[in-house]
Image: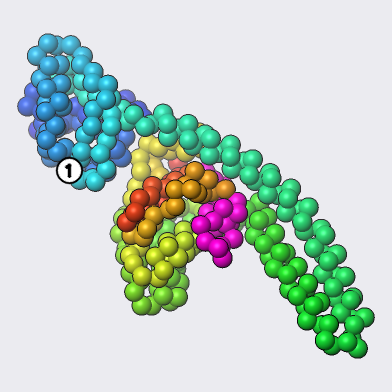
Amino acid sequence: MTIPSFAGLELLDTPVLICDADAALRFVNPACENLLALGSRELLRHALPDLFQPCPELLQALATALGQGASYIEHDLELKPLHNDAALHVMLSITPIDVEGCQALIELRPLDQQLKIANEERSLMQHQANRELIRNLAHEIKNPLGGIRGAAQLLEHELADRPELKEYTEVITEEALRLQTLVDRLLAPHRSHNRGPINIHEVLERVRSIALAQHPQGLAVVRDYDTSLPLLSADKEQLIQVVLNIVNNAVQALRGQGRITLRTRVARQITLARKRHQLALKLQIIDDGPGIPDDIRDHIFYPLVTGRAEGTGLGLTLAQAFVHQHGGSIEFDSRPGQTCFTVLLPFGDAAG
């Protein structure tokens, strides 16, 4: 069977499928591959109804469109892919066509797509505002810290004949040093980074080794890699820090006892930081812990926000800063028993 070419449809953001009169798939575009988390070769082996759990509304919509020879729209349809746990809420549009045996063009517009775009725009604006706030605050703190440390050292010298007071000057010096380290971490994202070609799986293996070395008993770190991924142009140390910060949070939530999955996939025809990319890395870090507390979910990437008394609240802030510097995005989905952080990074082939 000859598969028709619909080159123009491959560039669309909207997931599109084309089927024949028997509902056998003849074409899917990259956006549809992303939506259904399957490659085109696998999808084209199926008929349309076989991709989802039984959905009478889908079959009725197809029959109506083909029977009446007119477009049919279902504004809110829930589809449950057989190869994906997450239900899809879409606006379904079916248009009859007659091209080389193809009978129906089907569009699946995710209802959360516009919300996701708006959230990404808001996240970028929030990140920029946070960056300016942190930089200004860090500089304001950094200048007096040097004076405090210097004064403490002079005071310690003046009190050399009173050793019982030395511990007080040591506390001042140590706390000033701790604040200096914190300020350096706050300023770290604004420093230049060194990019080069890297294999993302080398990054993941480094982080995996660190996590298992720190928690050799009770922690499982599972690999789920797509080893065919191309190299990234990125700062290796920054990406290690991104993954390490997220994994450390997961380990702490699990209390060192549980399962973390490191998953890599390719995402096609995706928009990141207002640029269109043919290919992007989709990196997911999944744990089976208790989930992120409801009271911090809406501002989890804000600086100094943490769910742990001993936490600094900088890990995810730095991770987000590094990801944005690479033109990517970071988001999460969390419920009791599963938290998934998804990092999207372009491979560098902006489509304009």
Image quarter where the N terminus lies is: top left
Q: x and y percent of residue 96 in the render? A: 17, 16
Q: Is 314 inside the magenta-drawn segment?
A: yes
- Which kind of residue does numbered mark 1 sit on? Leu
Q: Is residue 147 visible?
A: yes
Q: x and y percent of residue 219 in the render? A: 35, 71
Q: Taking 134 as reference, is 94 left or right?
A: left
In magenta, the rendered stretch is: 303-327
Q: Which residue is mark 1?
A: 82
Relative vertical location of residue 247 with respect to residue 174 in this rendering, above or below: above
Relative vertical location of residue 218 with respect to residue 261 in this rendering, above or below: below
Q: Is 320 inside the magenta-drawn segment?
A: yes
Q: x and y percent of residue 142 in the render? A: 77, 58
> Residue 179 falls in which quadrant of the image?
bottom right
Element carrying mark 1: loop
Q: Residue at x 36, y 60 (%)?
A: 289
> Residue 52 falls in which quadrant of the image?
top left
Q: Residue at x 68, y 49 (%)?
A: 134
Q: Residue at x 11, y 35 (%)?
A: 54
